Image: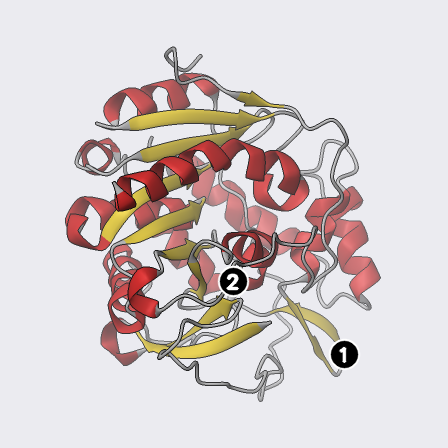
């Protein structure tokens, strides 16, 4: 079960946080009905967006390559890929370590459902719909800056009583996680960075994304068309990728004339522009908690850059997942869990020891 909890982000923006598993005793969650259906009919605007960041041997003894025996299939929208291990009971809130999961650009909290349910046996697992995404508020005149995203994550940890929390971030969410860890070390016990680069990507990358947004054939007639386009027909897809199609199907909503993304494409471009033109090595070096850099072998983060990120992080470690691309946690959940399990054990040991 997932429970929605309201969080007030920077500037009063209403954010939807989703707690997976039973809430700790004494921390009843506020149940909120699904409000994903839009009140207003979307504009027929073909300028749309994408949930990937652009396209490294790590130092010994950090290298761990995870190659699951059988390729895992992605979860259908809203469902977990594999059953989570049973919880040993419902611990008190003060005894339960918190984890905050932050999705990437154009993602949503539900993309973490399988991971969060798996974690919920040991952590209080909460995934956040970041501003402009999922069921969180998307103010037309709102701030989509680095400062706003970081402040939102900080507010979620403080208002939900998760700190010091393990931060798990994918792509843009990983950048938010390490920037918050650098600024508020008191709120963060550990950090997992999934397939996010620290280097500047440049204006050309932003222009490519803008062009790609315009190529989306919206509105999509059916969700099957969404899955096919993003999994097969998209010119950015080198070979059929079923998980990618499923991933994008989760960020669509139905209108009278077809299926549209749940986000505003211009807001996504604005959010990306806030970090794509700058490098983020300095803040990475300021992270003091144990940190794990994870990449898919076919992902956006190359080995050379991952190696440098691990070197720059004061307590950095490394793991990679074979046969995985940018959506590591989504298309190879078994490999993803195997990659982060030793690190989770370390974080829990540090907390109790």
Residue at (33% x, 24% y) in the render: 310
299 lies left or right of 57: right
Looking at the rendered structure, the secondary structure element under dot 1 is loop
Q: How is the image coloured?
A: secondary structure
Residue 119: x, y in percent?
Answer: 50, 52
Q: With respect to residue 12, does 208 lie above or below?
A: above
Looking at the rendering, which quadrant does residue 262 occupy?
bottom right
Which one is nearer the viewer's eye here, 69 or 252? 69
Q: Which residue is under mark 2? A: 109
Spatial CA distance of label 1 from label 2 is 26 Å
Quarter of the image for the N terminus: give it: bottom right
Q: Which residue is under mark 1? A: 257
Residue 90: x, y in percent?
Answer: 46, 68
User: Tag 2: Cα neighbours inside 10 Å, few (<14), some, or many (≥20)?
Assistant: many
> Seen from this angle, which residue lies furthest front?
88
Residue 321: x, y in percent?
Answer: 58, 28
Residue at (54% x, 59% y) in the render: 87
Which one is nearer the viewer's eye here, 297 or 75? 75
Q: With respect to residue 128, does 138 lie above or below?
A: below
Q: Which mark is residue 157?
A: none
Q: Nearer the viewer, mark 1 or mark 2?
A: 2
């Amino acid at each position: 079960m997932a429970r929605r909890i309201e969080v007030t982000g920077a500037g009063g923006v209403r954010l939807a946080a989703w707690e997976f598993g039973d809430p700790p005793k004494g921390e009843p969650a506020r149940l909120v009905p699904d409000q994903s259906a839009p009140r207003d009919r979307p504009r027929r605007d073909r300028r749309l967006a994408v949930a990937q960041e652009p396209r490294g041997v790590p130092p010994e003894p950090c290298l761990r390559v995870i190659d699951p025996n059988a390729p895992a299939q992605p979860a259908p929208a809203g469902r977990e890929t594999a059953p989570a291990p049973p919880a040993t009971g419902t611990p008190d809130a003060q005894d339960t370590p918190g984890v905050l999961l932050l999705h990437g650009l154009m993602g949503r909290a539900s993309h973490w459902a399988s991971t969060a349910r798996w974690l919920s046996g040991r952590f209080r697992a909460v995934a956040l719909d970041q501003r402009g995404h999922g069921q969180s508020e998307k103010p037309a005149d709102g701030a989509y800056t680095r400062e706003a995203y970081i402040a939102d994550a900080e507010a979620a940890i403080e208002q939900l009583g998760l700190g010091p929390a393990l931060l798990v971030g994918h792509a843009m969410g990983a950048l938010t996680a390490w920037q918050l860890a650098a600024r508020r070390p008191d709120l963060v016990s550990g950090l997992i960075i999934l397939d996010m680069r620290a280097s500047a990507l440049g204006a050309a990358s932003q222009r490519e994304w803008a062009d790609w947004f315009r190529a989306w054939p919206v509105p999509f007639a059916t969700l099957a068309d969404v899955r096919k386009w993003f999994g097969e027909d998209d010119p950015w897809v080198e070979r059929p990728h079923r998980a990618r199609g499923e991933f994008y199907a989760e960020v669509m909503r139905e209108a009278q004339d077809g299926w549209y993304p749940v986000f505003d494409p211009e807001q996504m471009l604005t959010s990306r522009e806030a970090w794509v033109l700058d490098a983020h090595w300095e803040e990475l070096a300021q992270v003091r908690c144990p940190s794990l850099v994870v990449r898919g072998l076919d992902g956006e983060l190359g080995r050379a850059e991952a190696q440098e990120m691990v070197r720059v992080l004061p307590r950095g470690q490394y793991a990679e997942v074979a046969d995985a691309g940018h959506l590591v946690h989504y298309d190879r959940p078994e490999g993803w869990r195997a990659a982060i399990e030793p690190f989770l054990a370390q974080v829990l040991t540090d907390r109790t020891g």
